[in-house]
Image: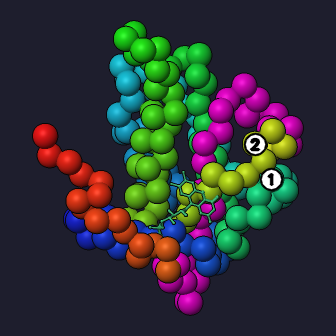
Amino acid sequence: MDFEKLSESRYSCRMLTDKPIPQEYIDKIIKAALEAPTAKNIQNFRIWVIRSQEAGEAVAQATKFTFGAGMFFLVGYKPEDAWIRPADGKNFGDVDAAIVATHMMLEIHELGLGTTWVGYFDAPKLQELLPETAGFQLIAIFPVGYPAPDAAPAPRHFERKAVSELVETL
Ligand SMILES: Cc1cc2nc3c(=O)[nH]c(=O)nc-3n(C[C@H](O)[C@H](O)[C@H](O)COP(=O)(O)O)c2cc1C
């Protein structure tokens, strides 16, 4: 898909099937993540591929936004490893991780799969249940699956602000 089509057609898919995802697709999503730019190329992010039933249940205990998915990606970063802008001390760890997560989200769509960026989860609880994630800031869960036959964008998807409200040419 060319980028214009990809960007236009992507939406938060909240009706997924749990049909297994081929390993080849998982590898492609990870490849897209690893190709993302990060400040100073520090690559201070971490991705967890949630495939086991036990880990999936941990995710389901931390959020109601699982949408019927059979697998998940979890994305996090370590702030202490990130680039800090000298002029104002801004830590770019969350920016880096968000770019990585966006690459993943777009690749998931490119593959004909569905997902939603889920930020509404109980991060401390998830870290308790998945101790491998301790010490990371967790920014996204992606429930991933094939879109269910009735899947469609939510009305909010179409609520876009005007260019004049968001963009200023100086
Ligand atoms: C950082 C972030 C966090 C989000 N968290 C959630 C969430 O927890 N649950 C959910 O259903 N959607 C979540 N969304 C999806 C947004 O609601 C959605 O992207 C927005 O309404 C625009 O719709 P669209 O993605 O279909 O274009 C999140 C999106 C982003 C970017």
Q: Are marks 2 and 1 in contact (CB under 8 Å)?
A: yes
Where residue 77 appears, as percent x and y from the top left, is 59, 30
Numbered circles on residues, count: 2
Report the residue at 20% width, 48% height from top: 168
The residue drawn where x is 70% and y is 64% is 65
Magenta span covers which residues? 127-154
Q: Residue at x 46, y 56 (%)?
A: 105
Q: Which mark is residue 131?
A: none
* 22 relative position to 58: left or right: left
Q: Earlier in the sequence, mark 2 or mark 1?
A: 1
Label 2, on which residue? Answer: 123
Q: Could you tell me which secondary element the residue under label 2 belongs to?
A: helix
Give the percent coordinates (x, y) of residue 161: 35, 65
Q: Is residue 6 in view? A: no
133 vs 9, left or right, is right
Q: Quadrant of ligand 1?
A: bottom right
In the rendered image, the vertical position of residue 44 relative to residue 59, given as above or below: above
Q: Is 163 placed left or right of 155 in the picture?
A: left
Secondary structure beneath disc 1?
helix
The residues bearing labels 2 and 1 have C-alpha atoms spaced at a distance of 7 Å
Is the CB of the residue bearing disc 2 within 8 angstroms of ligand 1?
Answer: no
Choose top left, top right, bottom left or bottom right for residue 76: top right
Identify residue type, mark 2.
Ala
**Residue farthest to the bottom?**
150
In x, y percent, where is residue 110?
A: 38, 65
The residue that disc 1 covers is: 62
